[in-house]
Amino acid sequence: MVLMRWTQGMSVGVPELDDDHRGLIDIINDLAALSGAEARPQSVRACLTRLHRYAPVHFGREEKVMTACGFPHLGVHQEEHRAFVLTMQGFNQSLQGDPAALAGHLAEEILDYLKNWLTHHILLEDMAYKPYASERLADVRAAAQSFRQPEFHSSR
Ligand SMILES: [Fe+2]
């Protein structure tokens, strides 16, 4: 099931970061496909593992870009990234409790969180650095030289 698609309107103007955001949309779609009462704990855990890989890689890249272009609200933005990581850790802990009973409910809770993250964080907070990045494109491209191919895309 495809719940969401990346569109050009979501572009932050840095291809590597757009690609990361597409990766998150992949995870959202995979989660949507398995949410509901019959979600298996191992499938939910696999999505959480992908999110666990995704977060430090993507947030690290974004923070490098924001530093390179002199984005003035880096600290506030980093706080949001930290909150995301803590929320994912909380989901992980919840899944340890009673995985069979919780998996379906948890998949929906994670999905709601990620959909909200996409509309609030990516479409508002990330968009705020876009003009700074386009103003200092050479600095951003230099920072992006070190980015490697992400590992959190689905195998589809
Ligand atoms: Fe961000």
Image: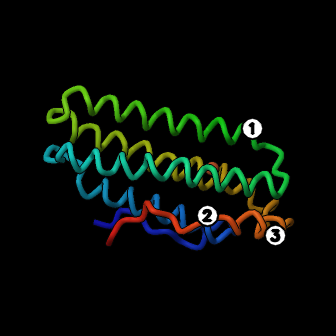
The alpha-carbon separation of the residues under discs 3 and 2 comes to: 14 Å
How busy is the neighbourhood of tag 1: few (under 14 within 10 Å), some, or many (20 plus)?
A: few
Say left or right for 20 vs 39.
right
Q: Which label number is shown at residue 17?
A: 2
Circle 1 residue: 75
Q: Position of residue 134 (x, y in %)?
A: 80, 68
The alpha-carbon separation of the residues under discs 3 and 1 comes to: 21 Å
Q: Where is residue 147 in the image (x, y as percent from the top left)?
A: 63, 65
Say left or right for 134 vs 1.
right
Q: Is mark 2 on a helix, strand or loop?
A: helix
**Dividing the picture into quarters, in which one does residue 140 lie?**
bottom right
Q: Which label number is shown at residue 152?
A: none
Nearer to us in this view, 12 or 74: 74
Query: What residue is shown at x 43% (from left), y 60% (from top)?
Result: 152
Q: Which of marks 3 and 2 is nearer the N terminus?
A: 2
User: Residue farthest to the top?
Assistant: 97
How busy is the neighbourhood of tag 2: few (under 14 within 10 Å), some, or many (20 plus)?
A: many
Q: What residue type is labelled 2?
A: Leu
The alpha-carbon separation of the residues under discs 1 and 2 comes to: 19 Å
Q: What residue type is labelled 1?
A: Gly
Q: Position of residue 95 (x, y in %)?
A: 27, 33
